[in-house]
Image (tube, rainbow, N blue to C red):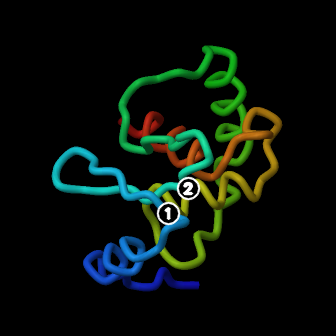
Amino acid sequence: ETMPQVDPQRLFSLCEGMRQLRIVDEEGGRYSVRLPDRPACFVDVSDDTDVYSPEFWTELAAHFEAAQGVGWDFPGGGGRYWCARALAAQSLPCLRGLSLGRVCHVVHVAIS
């Protein structure tokens, strides 16, 4: 599975013409597109802030130690996204209920 390439200008133009969407300017000339009637609940996957408990990291570390040498298949490549997908597919108790964006953040914090 590969990620499709997205033209950011075309995406912006498409979203700009839709009343059901709201464009929000972000830092660095970036933007996000949101649903106007929903609260913002985005996870900044590149935020270095560790919001997870020591128990969380202990449980995740125990999983990595147990899986050492088993080898994981990362279909489609590497990076935070693919690692997060592989982790989420493991159905680990410490990751239960976390969105894929939140698991991407976990991966980012773990490797930072």
The residue that disc 2 covers is 35
Asked if the residue under mark 2 is in contact with the one under mark 1, i.e. CB atoms within 8 Å, the reply is yes
Q: Residues within 10 Å of mark 1 (few under 14, many from 20)?
A: some
- Give the quadrant of the C terminus: top left
Q: Amino acid at mark 2?
A: Leu
Nearer to the camera, 73 or 24:
24
Q: Which mark is residue 87?
A: none
Q: Residues within 10 Å of mark 2 (few under 14, many from 20)?
A: few
> Quadrant location of residue 14?
bottom left
Q: Indicate which disc, 1 or 2, sits on the residue closer to the N terminus.
A: 1
Residue 33 x %, y % = 44, 59
Quarter of image, res 56: top right
Q: Is residue 26 left or right of residue 107?
A: left
Q: Residue at x 47, y 23 (%)?
A: 50
- State the residue position of label 1: 21
What residue type is disc 1 on? Leu
How many numbered marks have been drawn onto this rendered protein structure? 2
**What's the residue at 71%, 48% (across, down)?**
67
Residue drawn at x 36%, y 42% as measured from the top left = 46
Is 103 left, or right, of 31 in this rendering?
right
Depth order, front residue of 52/62: 52
Q: Position of residue 17 (x, y in %)?
A: 40, 76
Q: Work out whether 46 lies above or below 100.
A: above
